[in-house]
Image: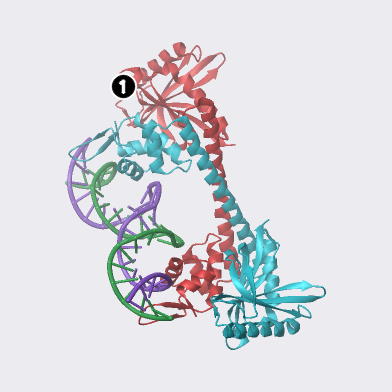
Chain colours: A cyan, B red, C green, D purple
Amino acid sequence: MFSIGEFAKVGRVSVRMLRHYDALGLLRPARVDSHSGYRYYAADQLARLNRILALSDLGIGLKQVAEVLDERPSAEQLRGMLRLRRGELAERVAAETARLARVEARLRLIEVEDAMSEVDVVVKPVEGARVVAVGGIAESFEYEDIGPVVGGLCASLAERMERASLKFAGPAIAWYEPADDRVHVQACAPYVGSPEGAGLDEVELPALAHAATLVHRGTMATIAESYQALARWIDDNGYRAEAGHAREVYLHTDGDEAGWVTELQIPVSAA
Amino acid sequence: MFSIGEFAKVGRVSVRMLRHYDALGLLRPARVDSHSGYRYYAADQLARLNRILALSDLGIGLKQVAEVLDERPSAEQLRGMLRLRRGELAERVAAETARLARVEARLRLIEVEDAMSEVDVVVKPVEGARVVAVGGIAESFEYEDIGPVVGGLCASLAERMERASLKFAGPAIAWYEPADDRVHVQACAPYVGSPEGAGLDEVELPALAHAATLVHRGTMATIAESYQALARWIDDNGYRAEAGHAREVYLHTDGDEAGWVTELQIPVSAA
DNA sequence: TTGCTCCTCACGTCACGTGAGGTGGC
DNA sequence: TTGCTCCTCACGTCACGTGAGGTGGC
């Protein structure tokens, strides 16, 4: 018979663990002194302790370890359990490896910029939406050309929605597409109400499974820099821009343009 | 201004998370209605939310995220933090990969044996100890030759310790070494007391950094099978037997040999 | 008799998910 | 007025580590 301290020593576990396993019914001491409450273990029980350690070392939870030890599952059930575990572990390894890559990307960035960059990119899904839209054409991607066009389209969109008693069900969204040597511009908004006869296009804006997003603050004159930072991040972090255009979501456009807040969204896939 | 629900939607987080970040002081709403307690967020705050998400996505704890956001550490401090993180992550990836390999080894084993093997190997460090020892020679590794020798040595060891008033400070240990075409056998035991003049060798049994261990139950006649199972496990799980002999630790040798409990220890290194 | 070992609570860990029970706003 | 959103607790998660406060055995 071993006292709990002796047994902990041969089994190379903490006394606390043995008490814990006792509390869970996983490993009951061979004898418990009814007066003092002292636990005594038989040498024999080291085998069971080892089973517990070996199984939990595979990452199996103690509850499930108890099932395996006491309910003697069939080989088929064990196989299933281990395959499941294998899948989970493979997923975790992949996730942690990706995380490691992101940390390394940050480190490279910080070497270059010598400060924590202020741009924080988040990859997230974007919901689709049914929207009303108006389109226009700008002469180039330059702010001087495109700014007024977007501004005009948004104003026109708001006005027509007003007339048709449509209410905004979310922030307005715009995107650009090169067309010949000019640029197609679309402004749209999710709505509540009935859009018939408002003279507005109805469009189903598709959901994006993964979009790299970045919050741009301030005037639209500098939005190109934010697009570039976002594109660089995508490259650096092992993503790839996917088919589909980038979107601009106008989260806040009241008052001075210096206080505007725009979210850029670029659809991506894991490279 | 966004209500908590709206802000959660654009930020793609749960309402609970926003409340949590508020409670931690990580992301306080721009305005809180003093009557209803309703939280309202400015579009602007999405940038801070994204910083929080980006940093915690690197596996940085929220406490440390708060420090990074509010205490504006220097580039050097950030580098240090990220390097630390990189090291931890690399370690985790290695550990999870090793775990995955063990699960796969189990799966291979179960394919062959069609049942959960009863042998559970645990790799653990073994403490060194100062021991008294007696040596002998057996004709071969066969049980018929070696059994009586070990038995005799243990009896002689116990008797001499008794005579010198030495007390066992732990279980007796034996090991074998081939010598010419016979086998050297050593039996030893940690002790309490003063061993001078007992006619016993004093030996420093070295600690093992990593030993693959297995509990053998029952007669020593079948110990060879346990050694083989242990050796197979070492191969299958990416370890290598290291220099140094295997040890047998006699955890329980009272009464019938069918009830004996022996721990086998083989020093290993990660392959 | 003095240490040493053992005992039983019970809190803390980490980032939330998930109710319970209740109230404010369109 | 009815849903819908929001509010504040507070427990649960997982496998123990770490005291606090106290008692038994050599």
Q: Amino acid at mark 1?
A: Asp
Left or right: A191, with A238 as reference point: left
Q: Residue furthest bottom?
A: A256
Report the chain holding disc 1. B
Q: Secondary structure at mark 1?
A: loop
> Quadrant of residue A21 in the image?
top left
For residue A215, say whether it is visible. Answer: no
The image position of residue B15, as x and y in percent, is 45, 68
* Residue shown at the point (82%, 75%) measured from the top left: A181
Residue located beneath label 1 in the image: B254
Q: Name the one closer to the observer, A175 or C13.
A: A175
Q: Name the one closer to the observer, B160 or A267.
A: A267
For residue B160, say whether it is visible. Answer: yes
The image position of residue D4, as x and y in percent, is 42, 70
- Within 10 angstroms of label 1, few (less than 14), some, or many (20 or more) residues? few
Q: Name the one closer to the observer, A184 or B10.
A: A184
The C terminus of chain B, quarter of image: top right
Q: Residue furthest right?
A: A181
* Residue shown at the point (38%, 15%) measured from the top left: B152
> Quadrant of residue B154 in the image?
top left
The image position of residue B204, as x and y in percent, is 45, 32
